[in-house]
Image (cartoon, rainbow, N blue to C red):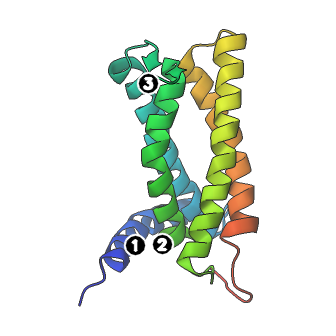
Amino acid sequence: MININETIRRTILRWIDFFYPLFKKWFSLQTFRYAACGGANTFLDISLFSFGYNFIFKKHMLSLGFVTLSPHIAALFLDMSITLPTGFYLNRYVVFPQAGLKGHIQLFRYIFVVLICIILNYFFLKLFVDHLGWYPTPAKIVTTAIIVIFSYVSQTFFFFRQKDGYRD
């Protein structure tokens, strides 16, 4: 029987690893895989945010009855609903498959880190857009750069920690 996760994983790794020789002297294989997967998910994140802000919410407030969301915050929740699962999948099955933790433990840790990232996203978007008057998409790009650094450190040292003895 064909394992679909393994097939998808191998296909993604073939694409990523094809380009690795160009970057080999600057990055370990795992760091390059993290950067490639993270870069793709970040591109998806910013694209969904921009699309949601401009075309779905059309730069208008979103009333949910019990709360009203500004369009950039509504777009944030839209993009996070898609990039959270894709990010977990890429990290779990492509970048850190050797982590040695059970999937539910990794998922719990991932959700914990993502909740912190959501809070940071919310804080920085409110700061940049509402208080400093930046346009939402550039504010999202700067916010994402900050979050990527936090996310890399937390994923590498907290929830996808490698088993002892693992090498690229």
- Three-letter amino acid code at disc 1? Arg
State the count of labels.
3
| Earlier-in-chain disc, 2 versus 1 | 1
Which residue carries the number 2 mark?
A: 93
Q: Residues within 10 Å of mark 3 (few under 14, many from 20)?
A: few
Residue under the point 25% across and 85% down: 2
Residue under the point 54% across and 26% down: 73
Q: Which mark is residue 9?
A: 1
Element under label 1?
A: helix
Q: Residue furthest top?
A: 133
Residue under the point 65% across and 70% down: 160
- Between the residue at mark 3 and the residue at mark 2, the CA separation in whole angstroms equals 36 Å
Residue 163 in the image, given as x and y percentages of width and height = 69, 85
Residue 1 in the image, given as x and y percentages of width and height = 23, 90
Depicted 113 relative to depicted 141: above or below: below
Q: Residues within 10 Å of mark 2 (few under 14, many from 20)?
A: some
| Earlier-in-chain disc, 3 versus 1 | 1
Element under label 2?
A: helix
Depicted 63 relative to depicted 153: above or below: above
- Between the residue at mark 2 and the residue at mark 1, the CA separation in whole angstroms equals 6 Å
Which residue carries the number 3 mark?
A: 64
Residue 78 in the image, given as x and y percentages of width and height = 44, 36
